[in-house]
Image: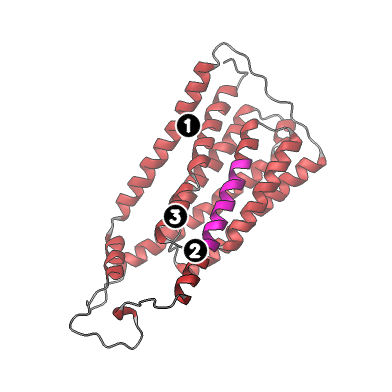
Amino acid sequence: MIYEDGGTASSILGWMSIACWIVVYSPQIIENYQLKSGEGLSVFFVLIWLAGDLANLFGALLANLLPTIIILGAYYTICDIVLLVQIYYYRWLKKSQELAPGTLIPEVDVPGHIPSEETPLISEHGTNETKKAEQSLATQCLIYGSALVFVLGTGVAAWAIDEYLHRGQSREQPVEIIEWRSQLLGWISAVLYLGARIPQIFKNFHTKCEGLSPAMFLFAIAGNATYVLSILALSLEPKHIMANAGWIAGSGLTVFLDVFVMLQFFYYKVTERSVPPESP
């Protein structure tokens, strides 16, 4: 495939961004499934994120932006809906189980219950939590880092395959249209993306990031960073920057808030490890 100057770098970064965003929701969806709960997520975070994705999608369609942006916008919207369905489904499921007659409550969890000789001193839940707390933070960083490198490498491989399949062909970039409706939607999506992180950050202060997958925010950071770089690598002409300004701001600035969420996670992880276990 034949590119103009900067097109190759932009294409590689674009594929890397796509790879990150394809998997970005998976860790949280899996986390919710394993915990049978979506309470680690702020409902307002997901709702505002969904509104931002919708504004992003319609704005990209109106501005005739890169197909990458349009495809990702549609995919984001579907994943946001999946997260919302999980949150409310598991809430309904928990409520149904609580109201179900004959539900047995373990002895160790009954308030005011005096343990008998048959009652275990440490519940299975407590044992699992202890094992989780004892997991090395360095090991987790290695796992997340390796996963990120693998995903970025997959993006590069996808670019190489696309390059091979379209070798010798010239692909023109779509003409970017600057008009007030698309620009308004682009900036609205930027504000919504930034605003969505705020309720999640405040929720983390209360939940200590329990039930929240740090991998989701790690891939979001990488996806947003490579996405912005792909736009800038293509061209630094004022018209190009102006056409994409809302999307550059929305993706670029949310990186800083996502980094803050990651810092919250690691802070609470370190704090959890520093607290000595209670004596039975």
First in sequence, mark 1 or 3: give its number.
1
Residue drawn 31% across and 71% down? 275
- Circle 3 SS class: loop
Q: Are marks 3 and 2 in contact (CB under 8 Å)?
A: no
Residues at discs 1 and 3 in contact (Cβ within 8 Å): no
Is 278 in front, or is 74?
A: 74
**Visible residue check, residue 109:** yes
Closer to the observer: label 2 or label 1? 2
- Residue at x 36% of width, y 85% of height: 111
Horizontal side, residue 30 vs residue 202: left or right: left
Rendered location of residue 248, percent (x, y): 64, 41
Q: How many residues crowd mark 1 within 10 Å: few (<14), some (14–19), many (20+)?
A: many
Dominant secondary structure (helix, strand or loop) of the stretch shown in magenta: helix
Residue tagged 2? 90
The residue carrying mark 3 is 213
Picture coordinates of residue 59 (x, y %)? 73, 41
Image quarter of the N terminus = top right
The amino acid on which the numbered mark 3 sits, given as a three-letter code, is: Ser
> Label 1 is placed on what type of residue?
Gly
Amino acid found under the numbered disc labelled 2:
Tyr
In the figure, residue 166 lies in which quadrant? top right
Residue hosting label 1:
155
